[in-house]
Image: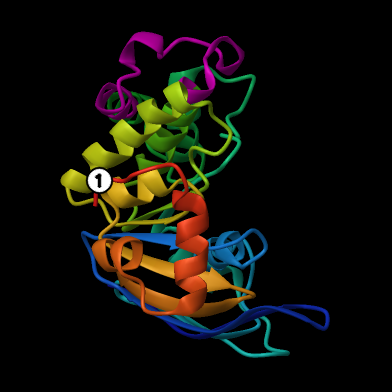
């Protein structure tokens, strides 16, 4: 279970997230949707503490951290939460001077201090899962965007996080390459991987998300099942947003 209570994030006088509260059951996929600048990516970065919330509480499994203005959070407290999460970024962020398999092994050997043979076996397992075992010795620059993102997903899964956080995982890809990533994430969802993803890709969200959260101006406007939000949203602003993105498309919901 992931629980966010009264999460607020400020940059100076700008309030980016306002009193965010969410319960995310394990084994489910939650999609964060909404207009650009609505707070989706900031919320993901707050969950894994790449951004420190100004106030509120984050609980992931048995670990929790509470934030208050003026109170500095200790590094150990941050690491306890961060190690519960794996992060997939929009632009892959692979180490260019490491091969695919070395990218997946890196955190296991340098952070978790796994021996090389154990880390390599885990990396091979995950690269096989995402369909990249045949490219394990390739440099990132020689891989397509979809292939790089699949390696990045394997890297994020390497330490067996409780939740996989995906920040616009298909937005930097053309439709054909995006489909590769959607297939991998769909497979992980079917295996019961807990995921929270920020996305503009309604095909991705409708295919694999159990629940959808519509964010705008740092506030939650509406939450519900994927079928409800995409099929019959209750809030007028949600209807407007979904209808704009749906124009000319149909989705399997």
Residue 43 occupies quadrant? bottom right
Residue 95 at x, y = what percent? 61, 28
Looking at the rendering, which quadrant does residue 150 occupy? Answer: top left
Figure quadrant of residue 8: bottom right
At x 47%, y 33%, the residue is 152
* Vertical arrangement, residue 36 with respect to residue 55, above or below: above
Q: Is residue 96 left or right of residue 123?
A: right
Boundaries of the magenta span = 123-147
Give left or right: position of 148 versus 22.
right
The residue at the far left in this view is 191
- Residue at 35% x, 42% y: name it: 157
Q: Residue most toward the right?
A: 12
Q: Position of residue 172 (x, y in %)?
A: 58, 34
Regarding residue 59, the answer to whether it shows in the image is no
Between residue 98 and residue 174, name the one nearer to us: 174
Q: Nearer the viewer, residue 108 or 197?
A: 197
The residue wearing badge 1 is 252
In front of the other: 136 or 197: 197
For residue 214, above or below residue 140: below
Question: Looking at the picture, does residue 238 appear above or below residue 44?
Answer: below
Q: Residue furthest front?
A: 248
Q: Is residue 54 visible?
A: yes
Magenta stretch mostly in which secondary structure?
helix
Badge 1 marks a residue whose secondary structure is: loop
What percent of the width, then of the height, locates residue 20?
A: 50, 82
Residue drawn at x 54%, y 29% is: 173
Colour option used: rainbow
Image coordinates of residue 197 in percent, x first then y, are 43, 54
- In magenta stretch: residue 223: no
**In this picture, residue 104 sits left or right of residue 54:** left
């Amino acid at each position: 279970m992931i629980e966010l209570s009264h999460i607020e994030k400020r940059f100076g006088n700008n309030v980016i997230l306002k009193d965010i509260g969410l319960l995310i059951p394990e084994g489910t996929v939650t999609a964060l949707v909404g207009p650009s600048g609505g707070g989706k990516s900031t919320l993901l970065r707050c969950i894994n503490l790449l951004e420190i919330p100004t106030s509120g509480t984050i609980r992931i499994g048995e670990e929790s951290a509470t934030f208050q203005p003026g109170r500095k959070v200790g590094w150990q407290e941050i690491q306890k939460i961060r190690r519960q999460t794996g992060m997939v970024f929009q632009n892959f962020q692979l180490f260019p001077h490491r091969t695919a398999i070395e990218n997946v092994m890196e955190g296991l050997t340098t952070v978790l201090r796994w021996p090389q043979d154990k880390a390599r076996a885990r990396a091979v397992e995950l690269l096989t899962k995402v369909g990249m075992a045949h490219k394990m010795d390739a440099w990132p620059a020689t891989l397509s965007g979809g292939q790089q993102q699949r390696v990045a997903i394997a890297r994020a899964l390497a330490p067996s996080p409780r939740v996989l956080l995906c920040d616009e995982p298909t937005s930097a890809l053309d439709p054909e390459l995006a489909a590769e990533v959607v297939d991998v994430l769909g497979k992980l969802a079917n295996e019961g991987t807990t995921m929270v993803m920020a996305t503009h890709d309604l095909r991705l969200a409708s295919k694999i998300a159990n629940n959808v959260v519509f964010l705008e101006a740092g506030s939650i406007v509406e939450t519900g099942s994927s079928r409800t939000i995409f099929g019959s949203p209750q809030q007028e602003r949600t209807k407007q947003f979904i209808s704009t993105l749906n124009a000319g498309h149909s989705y399997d919901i």
